[in-house]
Image (spheres, rainbow, N blue to C red):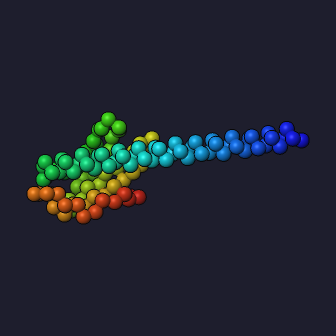
Amino acid sequence: MVSAVALLIGSGLSFLSIGEAKMSLQKNKSSQAHYLVTACVEEALMRLKNNINYPGNEIISLAEGSCQVLPIVGNWTLRVSADYANQVKKVRVIINQVNPSMEISSWQEVADF
């Protein structure tokens, strides 16, 4: 009887540990996707700063992975999407002014564009 109870407790703790490990891995992948999309937004902002007519509409490859910069809409609205290990992050950045200094009015992670 004592062995059965110990076996049940041990099994329960094992399943709990496995669940915690899966959640930790998922959180790590989500963080990596966030860092990737942030790096890509920064790269797209630099390209816009260097070329006021930067159209977007490209794939940017970085050491961490790649992301998609959709075509710039309106005056200067960047939409960037990154996928890291099936964790997709999307960011929309609205820029009021590019030169002489860049003025960003909004930087938001969005569910969809």
Tell me if I can see residue 68 in this picture. Answer: no
Point 35% across, 38% down: residue: 65
Quarter occupied by residue 112: bottom left
Residue 17 shown left or right of residue 107 in the figure: right
Q: Is residue 104 above or below residue 66?
A: below
Q: Is residue 102 above or below residue 17?
A: below
Q: Residue furthest right?
A: 1
Considering every residue shown, the one lying at the far top of the view is 63
Q: Quadrant of residue 21?
A: top right
Q: Position of residue 95 (x, y in %)?
A: 21, 60
Q: Which residue corresponds to the image point at 29% horizontal and 55% vertical from the top-left?
A: 79
Question: Can residue 100 be seen at all in this image of the molecule?
Answer: yes
The front one of 6 and 70 is: 6
Q: How many marks?
A: 0
Residue 6: give x, y in percent of width and height: 80, 41
Q: Residue at x 27, y 41 (%)?
A: 60
Q: Residue 26: x percent and y percent?
A: 51, 45
Furthest residue to the left? Answer: 100
In-image side of 17 versus 56 (left or right)? right
Q: Quadrant of the N terminus?
A: top right
> In the displayed structure, does residue 76 sit left or right of residue 108?
left
In this rendering, would 9 be left or right of 92?
Answer: right
Quadrant, the C terminus: bottom left
- Which one is in front, 31 or 72? 31
Residue found 11% across the figure and 57% down from its top:
99
